[in-house]
Image (cartoon, rainbow, N blue to C red):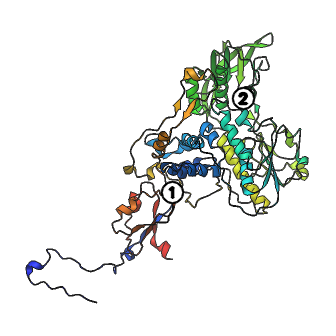
């Protein structure tokens, strides 16, 4: 059908030339040599999380008020959100792009907020599938062991956990004071894990009460024995009365055993165990507590927040100093002889090596000494059945224990190892991630699937992975025109003068308002959160919203489609995207 337009006079004619017909016939997409692609990349927080949590997703859910969905997102990967929300070293925050614009997102505080929700939580089960009728033994009920057991039992396996101590929890229970990790929080999360059907047998020390020969009914074994033994000072006098190794001291404190602390205490070391021991000694009645560390504050491995809180409570930090002798009188501590240190060239850890300053000896009067130089695993139970390297159980990339050359013919099959005793990472989150990857590897092993090519230890695996580009979004990829500098929301704390009177929790967590405010600061790096910026700016109106029925807080879902018949490939959408979730790719790649 055609139309004829007639202008009777010059006055009827338009001032400018105009088209009164459709231009849909002109498919301008044929001009394009690059096309926009919606591609979710990896946010730096997700990439840095040793437990493999999908942080960017649950933060987006919080902004929509979908708190329980957010909590379930964490629980898919980590059964200890209440624990990690309190004691994790939060390496995710060190990598957060928000750090350069108002401070990193307080991810651990957000995790704690979700874990502490009053509504009863149901631990998520995996989609039911056929699994081999196999039993798995887990040795150790710390974060690695329970994480492994949790993922295995959710998959349908029968799991028995053996624990040397009379109570479940490993170092979570006996190594972390209750002012950081309240026992009701720990108990609730452990009870939730065990309620899934895990058999627990306490008072069973591996190598004494049972051994590999007692586990023949189990198709796979996961060794998660932890590092329960303090390193020695190796100085004269350290066996005197009044010297208590840090791990032993904290075990006595956390199990409620009787312990005597003098008025003047020296804690040797710079890690979290040293901070915990010093702060616990203060709460037990010591009037003067000092932490002696042979390097500077910059090299301290302790969580910075813990160091700051210790100083608030009146604990003195003595840097660049090291004990060379425990001074005794009648077999009991009366002081320390120390030397001053200076920092030299970096050692194998990357930290500058401490060197003694000649002639710098001095003495200090103390009546209690707590060495907290680090921990090691007691691996005597292995004998010649497993290989030990640098004080740790040797494992391959899939976590399978390496056989000792001298006892290869007696080494059992299907033995995996993880946690601090195998990886040496030494954090709760790393242990949880180690247990999870062991569960995934054991599942493959029991199904008869190859373990070659299993991702390396540095890959933080997910039980519920999303299809994402492994490219990590950096700060320079973010379009800062869409974000303002907003300060980080700080957790509330009990005053120092009040908290040192007992072992009540120091940090009080977020209110709902705090949590919403903090979640809204998130850039959602590399993950589309349906902000509509691309739809608004497209000059050819060829980006269309999709109504898939999915909640708006499901980051990464396909929320838009591009009409490539008319998209010219101008790149405005990719340039304007606030969070680098659109890439431009060569057209020829898509036309092949």
Q: Quadrant of residue 29?
A: bottom left
Residue 126, located in which quarter of the rendered image? bottom right
Asked if the residue at tag 1 contacts the one at tag 2, i.e. Cβ–Cβ closer than 8 Å, the answer is no
Which residue is painted at 91% across and 48% down in the image?
A: 213
Q: Which mark is residue 276?
A: none
Q: Residue 478, percent across and down? A: 43, 52
Q: Is residue 345 above or below residue 422?
A: above
Instruction: Between residue 410 and residue 417, name the one nearer to us.
Output: 417
Q: Position of residue 509 (x, y in %)?
A: 55, 36
The residue identified by callout 1 is: 555
Tell me: residue 463, above or below residue 322. Answer: below
Name the N-terminal-most of marks 2 and 1. Answer: 2
The single residue placed furthest to the front in the displayed view is 119
- Could you tell me how many numbered marks the image carries? 2
| Figure quadrant of the N terminus | bottom left
Is 337 above or below relative to 423?
A: above
Q: x%, y% of residue 231?
A: 75, 30
Which residue: 76% across, 12% down? 328
- Is residue 357 visible from the viewing direction of this image? no
Alpha-carbon neighbours of circle 1 within 10 Å: few (<14), some, or many (≥20)?
many
What is the distance, in whole Å, between disc 2 and disc 1 at their CAs?
41 Å
- Where residue 567 sits: x, y (%)? 39, 71
Query: Is label 1 in a helix, a strand or a loop?
Result: loop
- On the question of residue 555 being in view, the answer is yes
Around disc 2, counting alpha carbons within 10 Å, would you say few (fewer than 14), some (14 to 19), or many (20 or more)? some
Which residue is identified by label 2?
254
The residue lying toward the viewer, choosing from 147 and 288, is 147
Q: Is residue 237 above or below residue 441?
A: above
Q: Residue furthest top?
A: 330
Q: Secondary structure at mark 2?
A: helix
Query: Residue 392 vs residue 276: left or right?
Result: right
347 left or right of 391 in image? left
């Amino acid at each position: 059908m055609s139309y004829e337009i007639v202008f009777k006079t010059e006055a009827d004619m338009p001032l400018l030339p105009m088209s009164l017909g459709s231009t849909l016939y002109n498919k301008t997409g044929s001009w394009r040599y690059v096309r926009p692609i919606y591609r979710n990349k990896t946010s730096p927080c997700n990439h840095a999380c040793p437990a493999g949590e999908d942080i960017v997703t649950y933060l987006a859910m919080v902004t929509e008020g979908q708190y329980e969905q957010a909590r379930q997102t964490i629980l898919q990967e980590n059964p200890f959100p209440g624990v990690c929300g309190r004691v994790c070293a939060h390496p995710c925050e060190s990598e957060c792009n928000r750090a350069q614009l108002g401070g990193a997102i307080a991810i651990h505080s957000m995790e704690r907020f979700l874990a502490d929700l009053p509504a009863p939580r149901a631990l998520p089960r995996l989609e039911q599938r056929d699994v081999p009728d196999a039993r798995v033994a887990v040795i150790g009920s710390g974060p690695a062991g329970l994480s492994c057991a949790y993922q295995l039992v959710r998959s349908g396996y029968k799991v028995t956990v053996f624990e040397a101590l009379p109570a479940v929890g490993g170092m979570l229970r006996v190594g972390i004071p209750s002012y950081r990790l309240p026992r009701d929080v720990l108990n609730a999360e452990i009870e939730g894990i065990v309620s899934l059907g895990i058999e627990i047998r306490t008072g069973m020390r591996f190598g004494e009460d049972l051994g590999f020969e007692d586990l023949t009914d189990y198709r796979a074994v996961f060794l998660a024995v932890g590092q329960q033994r303090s390193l020695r000072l190796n100085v004269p006098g350290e066996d005197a009365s009044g010297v208590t190794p840090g791990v032993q001291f904290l075990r006595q404190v956390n199990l409620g055993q009787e312990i005597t602390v003098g008025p003047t205490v020296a804690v040797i070391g710079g890690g979290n165990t040293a901070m915990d021991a010093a702060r616990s000694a203060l709460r037990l009645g010591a009037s003067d507590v000092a932490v002696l560390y042979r390097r500077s504050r910059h090299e301290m491995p302790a969580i910075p927040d813990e160091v700051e809180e210790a100083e608030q409570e009146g604990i003195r930090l003595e840097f660049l100093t090291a004990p060379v002798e425990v001074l005794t009188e009648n077999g009991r501590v009366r002081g320390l002889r120390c030397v001053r240190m200076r920092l030299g060239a970096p050692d194998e850890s990357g930290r500058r090596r401490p060197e003694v300053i000649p002639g710098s000896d001095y003495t200090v009067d103390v009546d209690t000494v707590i060495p907290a130089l680090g921990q090691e695993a007691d691996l005597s139970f292995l004998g010649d059945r497993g290989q030990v390297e640098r004080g740790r159980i040797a494992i391959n990339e899939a976590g399978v224990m390496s056989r000792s050359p001298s006892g290869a013919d007696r080494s059992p099959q299907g033995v995996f190892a993880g946690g601090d005793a195998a990886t040496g990472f030494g954090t709760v989150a790393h242990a949880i991630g180690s247990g999870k990857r062991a569960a995934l590897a054991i599942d493959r092993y029991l199904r008869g699937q190859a373990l070659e090519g299993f991702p390396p230890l540095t890959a933080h695996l997910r039980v519920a992975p999303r299809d994402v580009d492994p490219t990590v979004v950096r700060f320079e990829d973010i379009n800062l025109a869409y974000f303002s500098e907003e300060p980080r929301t700080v957790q509330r704390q009990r005053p120092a003068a009040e908290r040192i009177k007992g072992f009540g929790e120091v940090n009080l967590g977020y209110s709902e308002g705090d949590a919403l405010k903090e979640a809204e600061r998130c850039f959602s790096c590399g993950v589309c959160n349906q902000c509509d910026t691309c739809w608004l700016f497209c000059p050819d109106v060829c980006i269309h919203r999709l109504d898939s029925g999915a909640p708006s807080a499901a980051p990464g879902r396909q929320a838009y489609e591009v009409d490539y018949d008319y998209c010219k490939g101008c790149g405005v959408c990719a340039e304007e995207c606030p969070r680098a979730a659109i890439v431009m790719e060569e057209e020829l790649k898509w036309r092949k």
